[in-house]
Image (cartoon, helix red, strand yellow):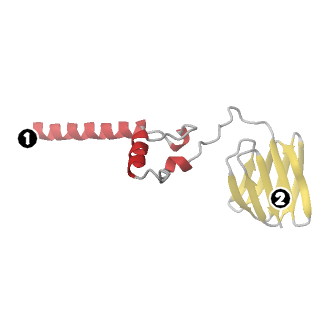
């Protein structure tokens, strides 16, 4: 009885280990090659069955490889600050920006993850070296791009 239970547990653990190894060995979508892989057998079979038709596209035909990730964090952040009457800041290189988001104050440094935040009434601080410039914001949106650009559209 005891040996049967032990053998069942061991067989379950080996199955779980095989499943986990198979899951780990699959490539992620970010690790796709630059040119999509084609299945030569499928293409040959398709040409035999329907020589006048183009082969169907697979999901790999539509997937693009992810752009390369920068190896180092940049030192400056490009800021565009726009209100309904004009542009306050246009492509200004700064060190940090603190925005009053509806979820709380948010500091944006170079290399920040791409985010969209709704702004609440408050003070937007732009830090450039030792100089801090403050703007009052009544509402709007902050668009933080992964390409080191922050756009603030305020009303």
In whole angstroms, how far apart are the C-alphas of marks 2 and 1? 72 Å
Q: Can you give x and y, in whole percent of width and height, for residue 111 in the image?
A: 71, 41
Residue plotted at (87% across, 66% down) = 84
Q: Can you give x and y, in whole percent of width and height, for residue 110 in the image?
A: 75, 42
Residue plotted at (76% across, 64% down) = 120
Q: Is residue 15 placed above or below 50 in the rendered structure?
A: above
Q: Tell me which numbered mark, 2 or 1, is placed earlier along the sequence.
A: 1
**Quarter holding the N terminus?**
top left
Instruction: Name the side, left or right, on which 34 lies relative to 149.
Output: left
Tell which residue pokes out farthest to the left in this image. 1
Q: In which quarter of the image is residue 19?
A: top left
Q: In which quarter of the image is residue 119?
A: bottom right
Instruction: Name the side, left or right, on which 7 lies relative to 87.
Output: left
Within-10-Å neighbours for mark 1: few <14, some 14–19, many 20+: few
**Quarter holding the C terminus?**
bottom right
The label number, if any, that marks residue 76 in the structure image: none
Within-10-Å neighbours for mark 2: few <14, some 14–19, many 20+: some
- Check contact, mark 2 vs mark 1: CB within 8 A: no
Q: Name the residue under label 1.
A: 1
Residue nearer the viewer, 34 or 117: 34
Count every numbered label the image shows and give the total. Answer: 2
Instruction: Name the side, left or right, on which 77 lies relative to 111.
Output: right
Tell which residue pokes out farthest to the front in this image. 52
Instruction: Name the side, left or right, on which 2 lies relative to 61.
Output: left
Q: Is residue 83 placed above or below 78 in the rendered structure?
A: below
Q: Mark 2 points at which residue?
A: 123
Residue plotted at (79% across, 36% down) = 75
User: Helix, strand or loop at disc 1?
Assistant: loop
User: Helix, strand or loop at disc 2?
Assistant: strand
Q: Can you give x and y, in whole percent of width and height, for residue 32 in the image?
A: 53, 39
């Amino acid at each position: 009885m005891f040996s049967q239970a032990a053998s069942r547990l061991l067989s379950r653990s080996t199955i779980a280990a095989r499943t986990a190894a198979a899951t780990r060995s699959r490539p992620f979508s970010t690790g796709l090659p630059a040119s999509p892989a084609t299945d030569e057998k499928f293409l040959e079979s398709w040409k035999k069955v329907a020589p006048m038709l183009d082969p169907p596209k697979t999901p790999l035909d539509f997937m693009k490889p992810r752009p390369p990730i920068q190896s180092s964090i940049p030192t400056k952040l490009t800021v565009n600050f726009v209100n309904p009457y004009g542009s306050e800041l246009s492509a200004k290189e700064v060190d940090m920006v603190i925005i009053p988001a509806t979820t709380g104050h948010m500091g944006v440094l170079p290399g920040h993850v791409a985010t969209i935040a709704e702004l609440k009434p408050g003070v937007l601080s732009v830090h450039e070296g030792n100089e801090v410039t403050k703007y009052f914001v009544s509402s709007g949106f902050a668009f933080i791009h992964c390409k080191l650009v922050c756009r603030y559209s305020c009303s």
